[in-house]
Image: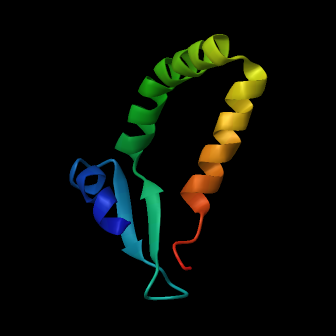
């Protein structure tokens, strides 16, 4: 997953550091530039979320978000 974040690191939006507790893990954080970019984009994200809920209804939008969370966090182990 870290390789997916490298472009964001190159753009100065996130920092990637070796974790203190476990050197195999990484600590990812937004930089000041990343926080500014997130603040600039938030209104657009919220507008898209409102449109999504308008098109699908609040209940279906919530169900979709829950399903996507399950997909994103599912284990790849058999």
User: Which residue corresponds to the image point at 44% horizontal and 88% vertical from the top-left?
Assistant: 23
- Residue 35 position, x and y percent, is 45, 40
**Image quadrant where one finds the C terminus:** bottom right
Answer with the quarter of the image where residue 72 lies.
Answer: bottom right
- Residue 51 position, x and y percent, is 58, 13
Residue 19, placed above or below residue 63: below
User: Which residue corresponds to the image point at 45% horizontal and 63% vertical from the top-left?
Assistant: 28
Residue 73, placed above or below residue 41: below
Residue 18, placed above or below residue 60: below
Number of on-image labels: 0
- Residue 62 position, x and y percent, is 73, 32
6 vs 71, left or right, is left
Residue furthest to the front:
78
User: Which residue corresponds to the image point at 33% horizontal and 47% vertical from the top-left?
Assistant: 13
- Residue 25 position, x and y percent, is 46, 80
27 vs 61, left or right, is left
**Image quadrant where one finds the N terminus:** bottom left
């Amino acid at each position: 997953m870290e390789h997916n974040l490298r472009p964001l690191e190159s753009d100065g939006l996130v920092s990637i550091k070796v974790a203190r507790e476990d050197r195999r893990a990484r600590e990812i954080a937004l930089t000041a530039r990343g926080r500014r970019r997130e603040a600039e984009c938030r209104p657009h994200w919220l507008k898209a979320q409102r449109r999504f809920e308008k098109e699908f209804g609040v209940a279906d939008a919530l169900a979709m978000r829950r399903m996507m969370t399950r997909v994103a966090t599912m284990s790849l182990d058999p």
